Image (cartoon, rainbow, N blue to C red):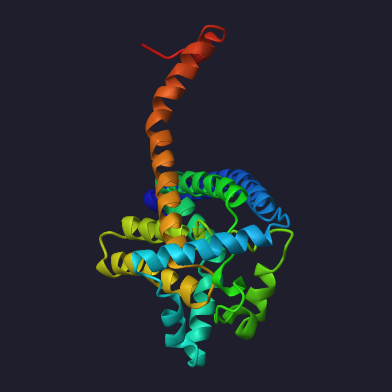
Amino acid sequence: MTIGSESRRVNALRFWRFTRRTGIQEAVVVVIAFLVYFFIRGAVVDRAGEALSNGLDLVALERALGFYWEPAWQSWIIDEYWAVRAMNWIYFWGHMPLVVVLAIFLFVWHRSTYGLMRTAFLASGAIGVVIYALYPVAPPRLVPFSGYIDTMAVLDRVGYQAQEAQAFVNPYAAVPSLHFGWSMLLGGAFAWVGRRHLWIVVGGVMWPVLMLFSIVMTANHFIIDAVFGAIVSLAGLAVADAMRRAQPGAMRLLRTVLGRYVPALAPGD
């Protein structure tokens, strides 16, 4: 074995040990944060009347703005079995399962981007939870006599049962649509880390477009829900970027303060 190959083996072993240790710590923190998010989000109170009223208000707003397109969009696919299944698949598997895949990928190969995206997801989730509690909105599939078909209930029992698990799911958490907002963050992250490859950039740009059609065609969101989801997710990204920029200064301040009591922690000259 050459010196070079031995050095690479040692470095790979060190990287694996570091990744395993920090990965477990990071996973525990993120899992707890998301469990808290889903628990609070799923703390459903009996506000169906308020949620329905708010949903109808959004329909009226879209009509006034000239883009109440949801019925037409669903009509494009409703008679095509494969298209409905594709939209159901994107809606269910393209949300939290893909978030987990992205997190693992970024954590292992793009650690700095991972830190930014993790904070953006958590910050936007926190904003979303507050809005869900203050402004419940019924999705199109729960608006009576609207003509929408709940495609998940008809053709995707696994996804339907998951979204009906009331311990963690709030059926009136339609605004903001973090399905769409987080798909923007997912697509943006993949496009950024793969910016040297055109096909990855195109895929990253197209992913939120596919998710937009999915959330509308499955009757889980109005179009305006996605608009608010984009705003909230971009706000989360702005918070994450601000925190990352402030971190070096905050750490220097912390070390300066602690250095008064623990000389070994004082910043060097």
Where residue 200 sits: x, y (%)? Answer: 32, 67
Residue 140, quarter of the rendered image: bottom right
- Looking at the image, which residue is at 54% across and 78% down? 88
Residue 225 appears in the picture as rendered: yes
User: Who is closer to the viewer here, 119 or 266?
Assistant: 119
Where residue 17 sits: x, y (%)? Answer: 56, 46
Up/down of 194 relative to 70, above or below: above
- Looking at the image, which residue is at 60% across and 64% down? 52
Up/down of 38 relative to 58, above or below: above
Residue 169 appears in the picture as rendered: no
Where residue 265 sits: x, y (%)? Answer: 51, 15
> On the rendered image, what quadrant is the N terminus found in?
bottom left
User: Who is closer to the viewer here, 62 or 209?
Assistant: 62
User: Who is closer to the viewer here, 80 or 143?
Assistant: 143
Up/down of 74 relative to 44, above or below: below
User: Who is closer to the viewer here, 22 or 170?
Assistant: 170
> On the rendered image, what quadrant is the C terminus found in?
top left
Number of marks in the image?
0
Where residue 182 sits: x, y (%)? Answer: 46, 58
- Looking at the image, which residue is at 43% across and 41% down? 240
Up/down of 194 relative to 18, above or below: below
